[in-house]
Amino acid sequence: MYQTHTIGKKVRLLIYILIPILITQLGMYAMNFFDTVMSGHASADDLAGVAIGSSLWTPVFTGLSGILLSLTPIISQLIGANKKEQIPFSLVQAIYLAFVIAVVVIVIGGCVIHPILNAMNLDPHVQDIAYRYLKALAWGMIPLFVYNALRCFIDAHGQTKLTMMITLAALPINILFNYFMIFGKMGFPRLGGVGAGYASAIAYWIITFIALFVIVFKQPFAKYRVFNRVYRISFASWKEQLKIGVPIGFSVFFETSIFSAVTLLMSNFSTLIVAAHQSAMNFASALYMVPLSISMALTIAVGFEVGAKRFQDARLYSYIGIIIAVIMAIIFAISVYLLNGQISKLYSTDATLRHMIEHFVIYAIFFQLSDAFGAPIQGTLRGYKDVNITLVMTLISYWVIGLPLGYILANFTPLEPFGYWIGLIIGLAAGAICLFIRLIFVQRRYKHSFLQNSKT
């Protein structure tokens, strides 16, 4: 990151940070996509087992890894404030915290996975595959959480291209070991969907070692000499990170888990409707990578400017990010509307199912428009380290407004399954409006505080 003096330069810098983040997010999304698709070529039971295991794991991982996102604004503000001597300590404490989180997940997961799967009334073979898939994945949980801390550290310097390259390196590794271990190639045992879990774990270890190598030997990270001394665990530092990270983690968890809840509620409808819903939701998730990536880029840029006490620059970045997200959403909305039929072909050749998918995809357009406004604001607020109100607003918009309203519309009106989507869209829109009001308040507070300090 570096200081910019014109709007044009700010746009260029934000896009420079954004594009690698977007490619990284799409790469991580593709890993899960290939796990599912390649398992499906092993058998229908393997596909179901991996899909169930992923649906249980994804909300937990995204929520807990959200805690580590606190490192991005912490490091960005330290860089902006030119307090670089504090950075190695903050990173090492984040690594310690990531290790502890991973161990806690493994221990608790070992205790609760069986009861959860038993409660789902699954086919015994599918249940066994889901359990063994998660057990295999557990071998990579420690490096996965540590990598997320390392990634936040690298991204906070604006070096998002590096994390992009590391994540993209993991994708062919994951696909290759999927091929070996799912289908029993090159001397490996044929493990079916369970092999996808081991393949992912191997990929997580490899990208973690690559990230460590980059931090130790590549500038500007090597100058910190992060691992040249042993730091004691600092609960005070953990408290700072958890104070910011826990609200972020819960916000992310509320966002991801709501879609799992809707999928479960959708099970009251026909298999055709559930399949169409899942296909459209999969497509909407891919579109969401754009506003999500803009959100992450804004956390870096805004955090840097806030740390340097350039609050007007931070404000400009926030509005540039929102405008970019909205423009992209409008382009996507027009494209999706015009190419709706082609999109449905990606998921099925069945005419009836395709027709249903096309209906759901239209609602995905409105998802995209709401996210284009709300997600960048969340990223901006994280740059200000303002996360508690965001947590409350996310909880209310999804679980108090969106889901109950969707349930009412789906079960007591002719909208039926589409009612859940309308409820979530309304909840998203309400949350985005409230977040925008909060953003204005925070920006005015920082501006007022700066003016008061200037006078004194």
Image (cartoon, rainbow, N blue to C red):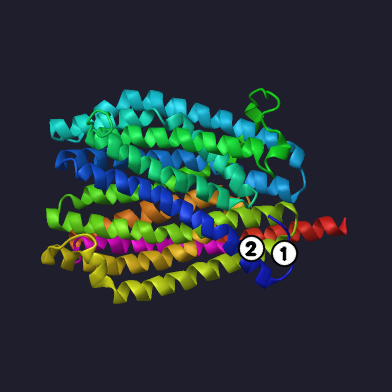
Residue position marked by numbered label 2 in the rendering? 13
Q: Label 2 neighbourhood size at 10 Å, few (<14), some (14-19), many (20+)?
A: some
Q: CA distance from mark 1 to mark 2?
A: 8 Å
- Res 418 label: none
Q: Nearer the viewer, residue 448 or 365?
A: 365
Residue at 30 percent of width and 39 percent of height = 178
Residue 17 percent coordinates (x, y): 58, 58
Q: Give the magenta-colored segment's residue range.
A: 413-437
Residue at the (46%, 70%) spot, across then down:
328
Identify the residue at image location x=23%, y=42%.
39
Number of numbered discs on residues:
2
Amino acid type assigned to the residue bearing label 2 in the image: Leu
**Picture coordinates of residue 422 (x, y %)?**
30, 64
Q: The residue tagged with tag 2: helix, strand or loop?
A: helix
Q: Which residue is drawn at the image coordinates 57% and 28% (left, top)?
A: 96
Give the residue at mark 1.
4
**Is residue 415 within the magenta segment?**
yes
- The quadrant of the rendering that contains the C terminus is bottom right
Q: Amino acid at mark 1?
A: Thr
Residues tagged 1 and 2 counted as in contact (Cβ below 8 A): yes
